[in-house]
Structures are given as structure tokens and as C-alpha cells.
Amino acid sequence: MAENPRIDIDHVAKLARLALTPEEKAVFGSQLGGILSRVEALGRVDVSGIEPSAHAAAVNNVWREDVARPGLPVADALRNAPAQRDHMVVVPKVVE
Amino acid sequence: MPVPLHFQTLAELADRLAKREISSLELTRAVISRTEAVEKSVRAFNSRDAADALAQAEASDARRAAGQSRGPLDGIPVGLKDVIAVKDQPLTASSRMLANFVSPYDGTVTTRLRRAGAVLWGRLNCDEFAMGSSTENSAFHPTSNPWDLTCVPGGSSGGSSAALAAGEAIATLGSDTGGSIRQPAALCGVVGLKPTYGLVSRFGLVAYASSLDQIGPMTRTVEDAAILLGAIAGHDERDSTSLRVEIPDYRAELAGRRGPWRIGIPREYFGAGLDPEVAAAVERAVEYYRGLGCEVRPVSLPHTEHCLDTYYIIATAEASSNLARYDGVRYGHRSTKAKDIVDLYFQSRAEGFGAEVKRRIILGTYVLSSGYYDAFYLRAQKVRTLIRRDFLDAFRGVDVLLTPTSPIPAFKLGEKTDPLAMYLCDIYTIGVNLAGLPAISVPCGFTGTGLPIGFQLIGRPLDESGLLAAAHAYDRVHAWGRKTPSL
């Protein structure tokens, strides 16, 4: 599979917030090049005048009554937090 | 020799429970001891809680003794793919990212199974975040095919199909985004149903590609699938894509609808890459339907060649968005090496995700990125419209479509290393997800070396009753799913 010159793997990995090793960059870059050369076949399909489908069966604007009701209790919501204090999730410093 | 409890069908066991010939405790014990005996070689489970299952079984027996049985599922051990939330049980999606996650709530299908009295049994292995076709992408361990332990069980719901085929559960739930219920069902010789998109709630399902994901039953017979579907289907206000439709008694409808059906054979599904033994077995199933008086006619789904490409754009785009939530902050794996909050995202995701998940996140991020959105994602959504239109056009002249489920029987563990080769496992199942249709894989024989083969029936949107009846017409006579492997 030829490497696709258009893929800037560093840029895409940054957008995805994903740290990749040099090996992963080489392998994924080459594999994605192969996959993208394949999916370029879609460019040959005549889609003029065709509406895109976000879902197979369009369901739009589903509303419920605007009434407060109990949600997940705080203890349950924080049950899987890697670090917590005073009913809050602890994270590294965000602002210098 | 009588069939051991752990290999009987849901319908048979429900009948025996109702007649008080057996208790749920007896049945659940049989399933647990079977699991202890074979799990070392099958490895279908990520975790299991025997004490919890036995307590559920006792509660079921107590209900029955009090004359308060909740129907055919009451007391039946049902296994759940480890992407479906069960309160207070682990939910890992077979990922290091969620290795220590415990569900704070029940998914809607879980709530409905509890309401029906089912004994929830085990967390079943799968490809990481349901991405794969062999269950080899599990971060924990591969699962073996009970018919040949050196082969894969299919995927991504390979733990669900293998556990069922090995007698480690009476029925299971899987999830299907591009074939992840039907393909492992075919490879393990059981029935697998992917319902119409929106029929079964996705609340409490770990999201992969939200516009394609559906939960569905995996069972030994089509009748069992009808029973289990009836328990989990129906509108749920906690899933905005859930359809407001009446749920019929699918099992009762099996008897009422006797065909003959007009069966369409899509010519694009019988081309290069189809294994000759699979083709022959599927052809014999077609002949059986012909013998029932069904009209069999060729049809064409002209955009079939574009299904795989369309799928890998839409599914990876949605996956890259859905999996953005795993950032090491509120739950899931958190790296201890991070310098600051942004680095925490990068490192936690790098450490928590496996190779296939990273590959799909990268591809999905790329096709959604500035400058490429129209060329890839928007175009794929338009082609999806054409793919759905192909199916709806075909259904003007026929009632169901019949195809192979998988182009090949189970392959060897470790055999497929190229991602594209793995993606080709799903070429006959992916179109159904893109079009949102119901489809079922029905076992239809074995290869010369003893590996199961399945055919797929595809139905009109929301015509699960017709689809199940057509599948039952074959299955009630052949019953390949009742065959059991020697383990």
C-alpha cells in the first residue's frame, strides 16, 4: 500500500487528542493511505440531487415535557472517577 | 441420551419451568457448572458473578411458587455482551480504557430483561468497543470458536455467540453495527437477529456508531429469538432515535404467517470471494424455500459495491466523535504520566485504546476534518441514501432477501492481520445497517471440516414478524442451531 501524501498524521492525531508512537504513526499512516485510496471510489458515484441520510429512519426533534425529575445521584455519577474530592472530579491544573 | 439442560432451547426450558419439571436454580446451576467446565478453552466471558446469578434464580423460583411468574424468560440465564450496562457489574467494552468501570445504572434492555425475570449471567467478550469481526481486538484475551478452538468465533459479539454455542448461556444479547450479531452467529452455528434501527433502545449501550448500532438476540432457534426480541423491543424515551411502534407478540406471529414468501436473491451477494461450501449450503436453503412453494427471483442492489466504503467513513466518523468522551477525566483510564490537563487527554487515550480503536479514531477524525468533510462524510451520507433506496426498491417485488451471512466460515485465530482483509468479513451484513433494516442469520449446515455456515434473511423496515416467520419456516425443520460441539 502506497503512503497517501495527503494524510498529515501528526495533525490528525492532534485533533483526536491521541499520542501516537513513531511506529504507530508509520503503520497507521500507511494503512489509512490504503483505506483512503479504496474509499475514493465513492467519488465516482453520482450523488447529484441526493439528500444525505444521517439515520436510516429520520427521527427529528424529539422532545419531552420540561419537567424536573431525579437524575443519577452524585455518588453514582462519581463512582468511576479516577480522582475526586468534595463531590467533584479532581484534574491537573487547567489554568497557569 | 437426553439433551443436557444447558443445551436446551429457551422455549423448551420455559415450558419445563412453567410445568415445574425444573427450577431456575437447577437450570442456572447447570449453566454455571457447564461454564466452569469449558470456559478455560472457550474464554467467552470477561467476568461472571455466579452468586448474583444464583440469587436471581432463587428470586425467580420464589415468584413462580407465589404464582407471579413473569413469562417465558423468567428464570432463564441470559448472557450480555460487555457493552451493555448492568448496574453494579463491570462494563469494560473489552477495553483497557474501561477495565475498572462498574455500571452505575442498567441499560434499557437490562431493565426489560429484569422485568421479564431473566437471570442476567456474565459479561461476554467482544472486540474492543465492538470494533472488529473476530473478537481478537479484545484487550483482555481472544475467544475460541467452540466448533474448532483454533478458530475465531467471529465478532464483534464473539463472546455472545461462543458462550451460546458452548452451552454457557441459554440465550445472549449482542450488538450489531456492521454485522456484529449476524456474522458471529453464522460462524458459531446459532441464530442472530439485528432488529430494525430504532426498535430496541440503545440507552445503556456503549456507543460505537450511533446511527448504525442496534442490540439484538442470539439464540439456538428462531423461535427463541422471537421470544427474546419481544422482551427487549419497544419505545424508550431515553433514546431519541427509539421508534414509537406497537410491539406484536413475535412468537405468536410465527404460527400465523405461513408464507409462501417471495424471496429475492441479490446477485451482488454471490460474487468473487464467496467460499464454495458456503455458497452450496446457502443454495440448499434456497432450494428448501422453493420446495415450500416460495417464488425465488433474482434482484439487484446496484450500490452494493460501495457499502463497505460508505460504512467505514460513517462508522469511523461517528466513533471518533463518540469516543471523544474517554479523556481520563470523569471515568475510565487516567494516565499517571501526564504533565498537564491536555497531556492527560493525549496520554490516557494512548494508553487506554488498542490499535484498531486508534486506527478508527484517526480515520474518523480525518474524514470529519476541515476540508475533507464534504468529500468523505457528506458524500458517504448521500451514498447511504442510495443504498437504502436500493433495498426499498427491491422490496417492491419481494418480501425478504436471502444472502450468505459471511463470505467465509470461521478462520484461524491470528490468520487475518491486514485491517482491510478483516473488514471484508462484513461485506454481506453492512448494507443492512446502513439501510436500517432488520436481518437474521440462520444456521444452515457445516463445512466438510465441521465449521458452521449461516444464511441471512433481510426484511422490510419493522417487519420483524414477517422476517422471523420466514426464518422459522426453515429453522423449525432443520434446527442446525440445536447441534452441539464436542468440547
Image (cartoon, coloured by chain):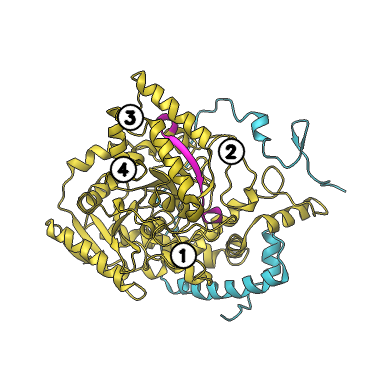
Chain colours: A cyan, B yellow
- On-image quarter of the C terminus of chain B: bottom left
Dot 1 falls on a residue whose secondary structure is loop
Which residue corresponds to mark 3? Answer: B71
Residue at 36% across / 68% down in the picture? B407
* Residue nearest the observer in this picture, B148 or B379: B148
The amino acid beneath tag 4 is Thr
Q: Label 3: how many residues lie within 10 Å, few (<14), some (14-19) or many (20+)?
A: some
Residue beneath disc 1:
B150
Name the disc covering residue A75, or none: none
For the point 40% across and 51% down, which residue is it? B166
Q: Which mark is residue B9?
A: 4
Q: Secondary structure at mark 2?
A: loop
Closer to the N terminus: mark 2 or mark 1?
2
- Left or right side of B285 for B278: right
Q: Label 1: how many residues lie within 10 Å, few (<14), some (14-19) or many (20+)? A: some
- Separation (CA) of disc 2 from disc 3: 27 Å
Q: Position of residue A22 (x, y in %)?
A: 72, 71
